[in-house]
Image (cartoon, helix red, strand yellow):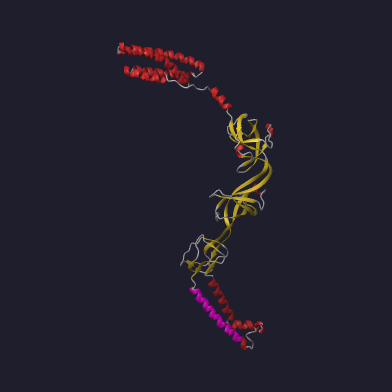
Amino acid sequence: MITHHLLTLASVQIFLVYDYLLIELWSLEQITIIKWGSTLFLNAVNKMNSVVTKMSNIVEIRYDAVLNTKNILRRFLFELVDMKPRTMFFTLWIFFLAACTNSSPRETNADVRRKYEEKKKLVEVVLLKKSTFPRQYISNGTLSALQKSDLRFGITGQIDKVFVSNGSPVKKGQVIARLAQTEILLQHQQAQTNYQKAKMDFEDALIGQGYALGDTTAVPKKVYYAASIRSGHTAAKSALEEAEFRLEQTVMKAPFTGVAANIAQKQYEQLNGGEAFCKLVDLKRMEVAFQLTETEIREVVKGDSVKVYPLAHEEGYGGVITELNPIVDEHGLIQLKAVIENPGHLMDGMNVKVIVEKQIPDQLVVPKSAVVLRQNQEVLFKVVNGKAYWTYVHTGLENSMSFTVKANTEKGASLDVGDTVIVSGNLNLAHESNVTINHNSKSDF
């Protein structure tokens, strides 16, 4: 800005010389014109130097900036001398027109500073009050269905039919899948035939010893068991029960209501006995396992409330701590479990953030945005009669949104219920700055 003013003053002097130079142009030869014009231009530069020096004393600018301006003009002059007359005068004409343009008045630094200081900053505030502070312990965990089971066929066989697919809702007792039954049915029929024959032989043995068939209570136990074994009745009965069990094992039924999952096999595939066919999960109630440190666990008990936030979305779900393992692992962590009611969005194995909340009563609570650093000290700003005043504080408990605060009495600070505390617009505030309260902001926290 200063350089622009100096050039303007200098250009006025040079323009007067240039005007006279145009009048004498047509009566002189080329060499004479250049030499004479150069002399006049040097005189103008010298006059400009005098003006610049005076101006530098007035505005107290750096001398090296003045010298730089002079050197630029001298360099321009030497280039000008080597030009043709027409080019020289055209260049001078453009230079003078640019230098002589009027510039708008500019404010001094003092004017700008005074206007800045006089301008009141708009801030948002809350009224300080005592309230219950929700202290938070944050951990990560994994969701698991509270009731789930891997379902298996008890025998080896070929899959005959699959009645559900992954994600299908299943009711208790509903058939999920079935193995091929042809061979099992034949074995069952043979067992039934053998049992009927053995039963007849058993009854014949009892009749032969003079006992009536309708009243087995009259038969002595020793006689009864001896006849049953000799006739093959006992063995045939066991074989039939085994055949019935194997037939039942060809049909898989849901032991409880839930959702089918992890079905990988298809119809006609061979399945080994004991191999898991699918998983049945009850997603209505979920269990989350998480860990806390030794210092955090001191204030947490069974029955405390928790909030679970899946990483996939921001919606939170409430639950209750149901289990606290009384063993500290090698990392100083304690395992806890909590049960959450599932509205339908949670899934088995989902990763979640777990927040355990403890309510601490009778605390001065402010939003985190209210506390800023000044001179490496924690402060907040109180508004008194339209001015913002530093108040040194100590922050105590902390959660994701707020602090508990106490006045730093060693700095002579004080905090009282009802104080007006700035929570927005305080980042660049100075002590005793003029402020205006945004009345659309919240009046409490």
Q: Residue at x 51, y 74 (%)?
A: 184
Above or below, comparing residue 234 to residue 306 in the picture: below
> Residue 249 appears at what percent x and percent y?
54, 70
Q: Single out the residue that lies furthest toward the left.
A: 29
Q: State which quadrant residue 17 falls in.
A: top left
Residue 53 seen: yes
Relative vertical location of residue 413 with respect to residue 101 in this rendering, above or below? below
- Rendered residue at 63%/53% (across/down): 320
Q: Nearer the viewer, residue 149 or 385?
A: 385
Q: Residue furthest front?
A: 440
Quadrant of the image containing the C terminus: top right
Q: Is residue 368 above or below residue 247?
A: above
The stretch of residues the image draws in magenta is 182-205
Of 437 and 326, nearer the camera is 437
Q: Position of residue 138 (x, y in %)?
A: 60, 47
Q: Position of residue 323 (x, y in %)?
A: 64, 55
196 over 406 or under it: above or below: below
Q: Is residue 332 visible?
A: no
